[in-house]
Image (cartoon, helix red, strand yellow):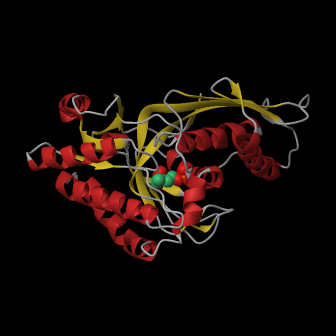
Amino acid sequence: MADNKATAHAQSNIAFIKYWGNRDDRLRLPVSGSLSMNLDGLTTTTTVTFDEALAEDEITIGGVLATGNAAARVSDFLDQVRHRAAHELKARVQSENNFPTGAGIASSASAFAALALAASRALGLDLSEPQLSALARLGSGSASRSVPGGYVEWYVGDSHETSYAESFAPAEHWDLVDCVAIVSTRHKETGSTEGHAIAQTSPLQAARVQGAAVRIATCKEAILMRDFTKFADVVELDSTVMHSVMMTGTPPLFYWQPATLTVMEQVRRWRAGGLPVCYTIDAGANVHCICLSSDVDEVETRLRDLDGVNNVLRAAAGGPARIV
Ligand code: PMV
C-alpha cells in the first residue's frame, strides 16, 4: 500500500455547454452532457493524509478549518473513496485555491478533482481516468471535467460508471484564453448543488435539455475546426439558455448584476466590430470572455476600461489533474 499520503493539483474548468440539473442528485448524474476547457493556472492543490491517530476527518481549506456542510461534503466524499479501498482510516485534508472561491469560478471542480486523485492515490487505489472522473463527479458534477486535460466532454451516461468526462482535444489544439471579468467576489447566494435541484421547476428546462446534444455536437465541431464564429454563437446561446432556466425556476435565481450585462453587451459589440471574443457565465456574476491568445491583451485592456469590472483573471487551456 502507498504511504497513506498524496498531493494532487487540478485546474478549474469553464463549461462552453453547461451542466444544470441532475437526474440523480445523490450520484450527481446530469440530465444532459456538457463540454468544457480546463483553465491553466486556476488551480487547487490538495494533500490527503490518512492517519490512524485521527478520530474524525480534519479538513482545512485555505488554512481555515472547515466545519458544517463544507466539512460534511468532503467527509461524505472521503467515505466513497474509503468504501472503494475497503479502508476506515480518517484523513487530514489540506486544500488551497489560488483564485477567489464562490464567485462564479468553479472552485468545486478543481477541488473535488484534486481530492479524488489525492485521496484515491493515498489509499493505493489505481483508477483509470474514466473511473477517477466518475469518482470526482460524486463530489461535484463539474469536477468530472477537471480530471482529463484540454477540451473535455462529460457524457450524460446512464449509470455511475458511464457518466464520466473525456478529453476530445488536447490543450495545444486551439489557443483559446478565458479572460474572467471579475465584477463581484461576493460568495454566491445559491450554490450550484441547490441550483441543480431547482432546475427541474423551470418550464424552460425541458427545452434546454432537449437541445443540449445538438449544441454539444455544434460546439465540439467548432472547436475541432477552430471555427470561432460558430463557437461564439453556440457558447453564448447555451449560457443564456441556462440562465433563462435559472431565472424561471422556483425559487428564481438571478446571478447577473448590472456590470454582468455591461460586459455582455460590450463583448457582442466588439465581436461585431471584428474582435473574436464571446462570453459565458456560470452560477455567479463574473463573465468568462473567451478569445484567442493573440487578442488577449486587447480583450483584457478593453475589459479593464469598463465600469464595474474590478479585475481580470486570465487562463489558457490547461492540462489534466496530476499527482505532485
Ligand atoms: O459542479 P457544480 O455542481 O458546481 O455545477 C456547475 C454548474 C455550472 O458551473 C453553472 C455549469 C457548468 O457546467 O460548469
| Vertical position of residue 163 compared to residue 274: above or below | below
Give percent across and percent down for residue 297: 21, 28
| Vertical position of residue 17 compared to residue 262: above or below | below
Q: Is residue 225 left or right of residue 72?
A: left
Q: Residue at x 51, y 45 (%)?
A: 146
Q: Quadrant of residue 260?
A: top left
Camera-side residue: 51 or 127?
Answer: 51
Q: Is residue 215 left or right of residue 27?
A: left
Q: Residue at x 34, y 71 (%)?
A: 214
Q: Is residue 66 left or right of residue 231?
A: right
Q: Quadrant of residue 307?
A: top left
Give percent across and percent down for residue 123: 77, 39
Q: Quadrant of the C terminus?
A: top right
Give percent across and percent down for residue 179: 31, 36
Camera-side residue: 230 or 267?
Answer: 267
Give percent across and percent down for residue 34: 44, 60
Camera-side residue: 14 or 155?
Answer: 14
Camera-side residue: 173 or 281?
Answer: 281
